Image: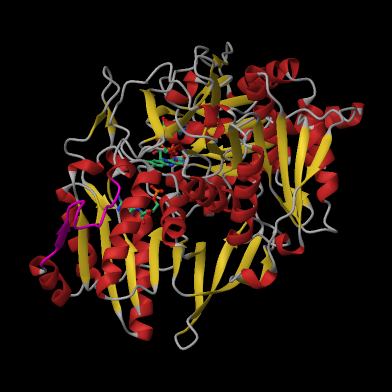
């Protein structure tokens, strides 16, 4: 990713790829897992990787690295059911917990051995640590936090689009003379791949080739987060969010009331978080969480681009805003122009009644 | 302890405006600040210096104006500052930037060995979080990213123990110096500049290095030439074509609006009621 996006260079079209680089074939998705679970971002990337591989007419592979005894083989078959044609599996006790040294060495070796043209990694804390290290070791290009991936068929290159300058602009980045082309994508930006349990594919095992003594960094302890009572916005089906239009922290209770009736998570805009009305974990947007619920209700939210990028992929967006010209109405599904302080209670009541009839009928 | 802290001067993105016609960034009048994430690293480095003694050198690559960011860092307590500036660096992506910064750090090391390098979690303009890991790989240093707490440094055995934010939990990691650390936001709060340090900052003779002084051996690895990634297009997000359907009723009473909205919603998404019932129960 260019540090200086203003430096606008003409896209060099039709570059003759070095024959050594032209040998790089196939699309790879790094399958991230921790404590027995694959991070959903990996399956989101698998769906995206499938499209890229089809466009290029090449195979899609999942990369699973972990310790024997973990569910690594199961993850390989899941990867295939989520769309991969094959899996590369690297098993070693050293890979039990994530550490930069062995994972960088392992993934770099895999790339050098099997030569993929594209490598996708989730932009999680693990993924960013790994992607930056692997790209530098391989001396190739890496585009971070992409929101869109496409293939430019003219030179078989990956066109990776990402927000820049605080989200006010987008830029498309290509890596022409280097392979593999690497990109990271944040969780929930892409749709989940569909699961097909009839799919089968092969698994290729490759050794890590390290012994524990070679690794300097040791994991002394792992303290799992206490998720009890912590907001789980990223995977919520329904989210009710409030913005500065609610005016006072007391009024935010109206958001909680509606959320309770819907069994929804509560979200917020940055100013609301900064004012301390709700905890930082609830911020939706560019510097907060990306969400894609089935229903997103936005009350007193203007719809600034930095908020929009975090929630515009919701199935249905309902916006309540007193200003008929608020930008949120440019992309919401339904809008109510009015005072959130009176619309919210009415909506809560209407949902309550509707749901009681559903329950009776069900 | 000798600690190098990499800081970048960035435009205050909260104040950036995009030109409505040309889609270019209007930088004029936008104040330049020290990348906010780098301040957590700087403060952490200063705390280590307070506790274990030693020096903190701040390093920045950028245009001559980036001097301001370095002087700011001195006013907080950094001992020395180096600005790497050369037209040849223009257009550097993260791979080229990490090459340039790593080679500058090697030059710094010729005077005093470096025990730790700090980088910010990410910048607010580049926003990639790649330069830190990149420098570590190029210097063959151990890498600790997303550090939320430095538990202990053992100067005798040259080891460091930290807490690192991982997915779903915190890893407690122990490794050897020299290492590169990126610090999680909110880890600490930047101290106030003292009067003495503010005076020092104003007078301090900055070291300004061009590409030769920064020890760049291979000019094909910096600037546009050294950057694998190419920005092919910059554009404004396309506005969605469909505007919201505004709910309207004769009375426009809140209750009627709500009921009308729900009728439309559940006609469009009949399964939604089941999802809600499942969550709400
Ligand atoms: C680098 C950067 C990152 C950012 N990251 C994020 C992010 O992650 N998430 C985020 O949300 N923001 C982010 N922002 C901030 C963002 O630009 C906006 O400032 C913010 O989203 C606006 O929040 P808001 O809609 O609550 O407030 P406002 O923009 O003030 O909007 C309030 C809205 O409420 C309406 N209103 C007023 N009274 C009522 C009423 N009685 N009933 C109904 N409606 C009413 C108004 O018409 C207005 O549209 C970021 C900014 C920058 C520069
Ligand atoms: N030009 C630069 N000069 C000094 N440090 C930099 C520069 N660019 C990036 N960094 C460091 O690398 C970190 C990550 O940057 P980025 O990869 O752009 O998100 C920053 O927080 C800085 O500590």
Q: Nearer the viewer, residue B30 or A300?
A: B30
Extreme-bottom residue of the structure: B156
Q: For this view, does A289 lie left or right of residue A305?
A: right
Q: Residue at x 58, y 19 (%)?
A: A334
- Residue B187 or A267: which is nearer the viewer? B187
Residue A216 higher or lower than A265, as above or below: below
Q: Quadrant of residue A5?
A: top left
In the rendered image, residue A12, in percent from the top left (x then y), is placed at: 37, 20
Q: Quadrant of the N terminus of chain B?
A: bottom left
What percent of the width, then of the height, locates residue B223?
29, 40
Q: Is residue B71 left or right of residue A106?
A: left
The answer to if A159 sits in the magenta stretch is no
User: Going 65% across and 53% down the picture, which residue do you hit?
Assistant: A106
Which quarter shows the C terminus of chain B? top right
Q: Residue furthest front?
A: A19
Q: Quadrant of ligand 1?
A: top left
Q: Can you see residue A165? A: yes
> Could you tell me residue B57's position as x and y percent?
27, 69
Q: Quadrant of residue A83?
A: top right
Q: Which residues are magenta?
A: B205-218
Q: Main secondary structure of the magenta part?
A: loop
The correct choice, above or below, for A188 with respect to B190 in the image is: above
Where residue A247 appears, x then y in whole percent? 44, 42
Judged left or right of residue B176, residue A358 is right
Residue furthest toward the left?
B203
Q: Choose top left, top right, bottom left or bottom right for residue B172.
A: bottom right
Instruction: Tell me, yes or no, if residue A348 can be seen here.
Output: no
- Magenta stretch contains residue B213: yes
């Amino acid at each position: 990713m260019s540090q200086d996006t203003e430096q606008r260079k003409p896209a060099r079209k039709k570059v003759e790829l070095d024959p050594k680089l032209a040998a790089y074939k196939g699309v790879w998705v790094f399958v991230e897992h921790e404590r027995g679970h694959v991070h959903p971002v990996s399956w989101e990337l698998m769906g995206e990787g499938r499209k890229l591989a089809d466009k290029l007419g090449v195979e899609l592979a999942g990369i699973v690295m972990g310790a024997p005894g973990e569910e690594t083989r199961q993850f390989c078959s899941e990867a295939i059911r989520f769309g991969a044609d094959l899996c590369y599996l690297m098993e070693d006790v050293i890979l039990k917990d994530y550490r930069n040294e062995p994972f960088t060495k392992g993934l770099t070796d895999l790339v050098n051995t099997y030569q993929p043209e594209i490598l996708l990694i989730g932009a999680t804390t693990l993924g960013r640590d790994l992607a930056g290290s692997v790209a530098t070791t391989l001396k190739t290009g890496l585009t971070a936090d992409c929101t869109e991936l496409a293939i430019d068929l003219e030179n078989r290159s990956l066109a990776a689009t990402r927000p820049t300058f605080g989200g006010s602009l987008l830029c498309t980045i290509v890596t022409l003379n280097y392979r593999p082309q690497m990109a990271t994508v944040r969780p929930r930006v892409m749709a989940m791949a569909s699961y097909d349990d009839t799919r089968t594919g092969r698994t290729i095992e490759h050794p890590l080739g390290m012994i524990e003594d070679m690794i300097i960094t040791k994991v002394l302890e792992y303290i799992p987060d206490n998720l009890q009572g912590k907001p789980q916005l990223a995977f919520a089906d329904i989210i009710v969010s409030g913005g500065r239009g609610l005016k006072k922290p007391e009024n935010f209770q109206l958001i909680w009331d509606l959320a309770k009736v819907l069994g929804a998570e509560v979200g917020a805009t940055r100013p609301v978080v900064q004012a301390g009305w709700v905890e930082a974990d609830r911020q939706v947007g560019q510097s907060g969480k990306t969400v894609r619920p089935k229903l997103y209700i936005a009350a007193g939210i203007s719809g600034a681009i930095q908020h929009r990028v975090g929630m515009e992929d919701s199935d249905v967006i309902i916006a309540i805003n007193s200003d008929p010209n608020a930008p949120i109405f440019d992309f919401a599904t339904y809008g109510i122009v009015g005072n959130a302080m009176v619309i919210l209670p009415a909506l809560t009541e209407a949902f309550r009644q509707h749901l009681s009839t559903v329950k009776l009928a069900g | 302890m000798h600690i190098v802290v990499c800081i970048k001067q960035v435009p205050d993105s909260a104040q950036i405006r995009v030109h409505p016609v040309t889609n270019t960034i209007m930088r004029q009048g936008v104040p330049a600040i020290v990348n906010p994430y780098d301040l957590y690293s700087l403060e952490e480095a200063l705390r280590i210096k307070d506790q274990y003694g030693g020096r903190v050198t701040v390093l920045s690559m950028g245009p001559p104006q980036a001097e301001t960011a370095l002087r700011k860092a001195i006013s907080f307590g950094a001992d020395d500052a180096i600005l790497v500036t050369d037209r040849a660096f223009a257009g550097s992506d993260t791979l080229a930037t990490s090459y340039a910064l790593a080679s500058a750090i090697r030059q710094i090391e010729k005077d005093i060995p470096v025990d730790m390098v700090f980088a910010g979690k990410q910048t607010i303009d580049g926003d990639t979080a790649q330069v830190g890991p990149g420098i570590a790989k190029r210097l063959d240093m151990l890498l600790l990213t997303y550090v939320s707490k430095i538990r202990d440094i053992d100067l005798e055995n040259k080891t460091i123990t930290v807490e690192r934010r991982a997915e779903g939990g915190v890893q407690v990691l122990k490794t050897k110096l020299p290492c590169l650390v990126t610090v999680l936001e909110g880890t600490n709060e930047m101290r106030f500049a003292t009067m003495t340090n503010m005076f020092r900052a104003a007078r301090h003779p900055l070291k300004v290095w061009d590409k030769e002084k920064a020890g760049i051996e291979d000019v094909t690895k910096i600037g546009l030439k050294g950057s694998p990634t190419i920005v092919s297009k910059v554009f404004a997000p396309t506005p969605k074509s469909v505007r919201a359907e505004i709910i309207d009723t004769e009375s426009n009473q809140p209750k009627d609006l709500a009921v009308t909205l729900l009728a439309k919603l559940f006609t469009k998404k009949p399964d939604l009621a089941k999802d809600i019932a499942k969550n709400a129960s």
